[in-house]
Image: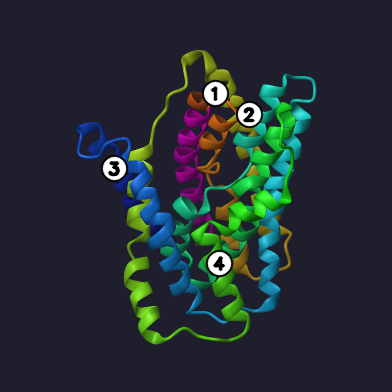
Amino acid sequence: MTEILMKAASFVAIIAMGYCLRRAGFFKESDFGLLSKIVLKITLPAAIVTNFSRIELDPSMLGLALPGFLGGAFLILLALALNAHKSRDSRAFDILNLSGYNIGNFTMPFAQGFLGPMGVAATSLFDTGNAFVCLGGSYSLAVIAKGEKGGFSVRNIVRTMLRSVPFDTYLFMTILSLLHWRLPECVVNFSGIVGGANSFMAMLMIGVGFKVSGSRSQTGRIVKTLGIRYGVSAALAAVYMFLLPIGLEYRQALVILAFSPIASSSPAYTGLIEGDVGLASAINSLSIVISLVLITGALLLML
């Protein structure tokens, strides 16, 4: 228990450090983009390569991508149901800001720190399914819900995913693992050094980007959105832990994944449909705080 609390406290301290350094002027708000590129295009892919290289991937594990996709799809359907008699803008906003999971920037460092290579592999496969939702799927459906031109496009979703370096890395390493091919040891050693920095860089990035810009008049909307999101998360976590007929290490990974924050791409996509970016940013930032508490609590109970 002490080790879990110490590691979780270290993650919180790094986030707080990033936030304080931005407030002090060491980082500019625009630096978030640079840190995000480093995490998504360098340290996270390296961490994926390293952890996939340490395991033997069984084909049955590919099913772990389904919860990542189905969880996001359920939240989209719930957003549509809750907004059936509301405005198109409200419907589109909830599609984007209820669904999707922030795995690479947030939950992956927890998997690295607490669950080991098998947990990281399960997290990576979950995120592969999640990518279909948060890297284009939810945005395309939000465009349809708002009644704008363009509509749903599988081609655009696939193109967006293939431009994602983490998704390409997931795909590449999954294929190598299933074929039982291994990368040269020098490549794995290099990726181990670079990937070892992923937890620090991801949490620092979150701190630098942390911002609550929603107005007080929007408090009710924020509470409602986060209440629905984490109510569903708790139900899914219970299903994953107690009902799925899979190994304990996979169920533990799915539980912390269920409590992941809302996808970090949601505020950006909200801006693209001319939605309330301030409200989306507030919801997204607060979901990080809630997820920190819930994931730490879940780890204390499970490990």
Q: What residue is shown with label 2?
A: 93
Tag 3's secondary structure? helix
Say if the magenta span includes residue 9: no
Amino acid at circle 1: Asp
Mark 2 and 1 residues: CB-CB less than 8 Å, in contact?
A: yes
Say if the magenta span includes residue 293: yes
Q: The magenta stretch spans which residues?
A: 280-303
Residue 77 appears left or right of 192: right
The answer to which quarter of the image holds residue 243 is bottom right
Q: CA distance from mark 2 to mark 4?
A: 29 Å
Task: Give coordinates of residue 133: x percent, y percent.
Answer: 65, 48
Q: CA distance from mark 1 to mark 3?
A: 25 Å
Q: Nearer the viewer, residue 122 or 132?
A: 132
Q: Of the residues tagged 1 and 3, which is closer to the observer?
A: 1
The answer to which quarter of the image holds residue 249 is bottom right
Task: Give coordinates of residue 256: x percent, y percent.
Answer: 55, 54
Q: Residue at image x 35%, y 79%? A: 189
> Which numbered tag is attached to residue 170?
4
Mark 2 and 4 residues: CB-CB less than 8 Å, in contact?
A: no
Does residue 67 appear in this view? yes
Q: What residue is shown with label 3?
A: 18
Q: Earlier in the sequence, mark 3 or mark 4?
A: 3
How crowded is the residue under tag 2: few (<14 C-alpha within 10 Å), some, or many (20+)?
many
Q: Of the residues tagged 3 and 4, which is closer to the observer?
A: 4
Q: CA distance from mark 1 to mark 4?
A: 32 Å
Q: Earlier in the sequence, mark 2 or mark 4?
A: 2
Q: CA distance from mark 3 to mark 2?
A: 29 Å
Q: Nearer the viewer, residue 120 or 273?
A: 273
Q: What residue is shown with label 1?
A: 276
Task: Give coordinates of residue 178: x percent, y percent.
Answer: 63, 81
Q: Earlier in the sequence, mark 3 or mark 2?
A: 3
